[in-house]
Image (cartoon, rainbow, N blue to C red):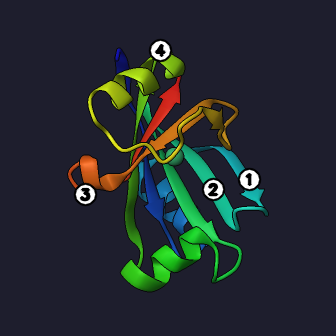
Amino acid sequence: MVLTRIHHVGIAVKDMDESIERYRAALGAELVHRAVNEKEGLEAAFLRTGEGEVELMSSTRPESPVGKFLAKRGPGLHHVAYGVSDIAAALADARAAGLELIDSEPRMGMHGSLIAFVHPKTMGGVLTELVET
Ligand code: CO
């Protein structure tokens, strides 16, 4: 697959407002997008950090996937996202390389780009996201 860059890093946080303010004030990161996905019980905020972005993630209810992540592991690194020029080709390459895909087909992410997740167990323990850029 053709990688373009590390696109963003996903970080699970407990308090979204406080975390956004921390990243803005301490790093000078710029908030570019903030949205809630009720179906997934997820609130996400994307902040530009120079070339890349950080995706802050919090839960809207404790039983959501991010809510369970926070309960089990606490705040911290959730996933690393790589930009790819062609997500369908990247998924085919990932499958051929023996990676375990969570999303067998691309789906629309919260930032309006096609994404797919790869299971952490074939990626050194890190949940991995592919983003079409
Ligand atoms: Co992400």
Residue 66 in the image: state x and y as whole percent: 55, 69
State how many labels appear: 4
Q: Which residue is mark 4?
A: 85
Circle on res. 35: 1
Q: Residue 117 location, x and y as percent?
A: 47, 44
Q: Nearer the viewer, mark 3 or mark 4?
A: 3
Real-space CA distance between mark 2 and mark 1, rounded to the nearest whole angstrom = 6 Å
Q: Secondary structure at mark 3?
A: loop
Q: Position of residue 4 (x, y in %)?
A: 38, 18
Task: Give the CA separation, mark 3 to mark 4.
Answer: 24 Å
The residue at 26%/28% (across/down) is 97
Residue 37 shown left or right of residue 30 in the figure: right
Q: Is residue 40 above or below residue 6?
A: below
Amino acid carrying label 2: it is Ala
Q: Amino acid at mark 4?
A: Ser
Q: Is mark 2 within 8 Å of ligand 1?
A: yes
Asked if 52 appears above or below 93 in the picture, the reply is below
Residue under the image location 53 percent in, 58 percent down: 56
Q: Is residue 50 visible?
A: no
**Type of the residue with mark 1:** Ala
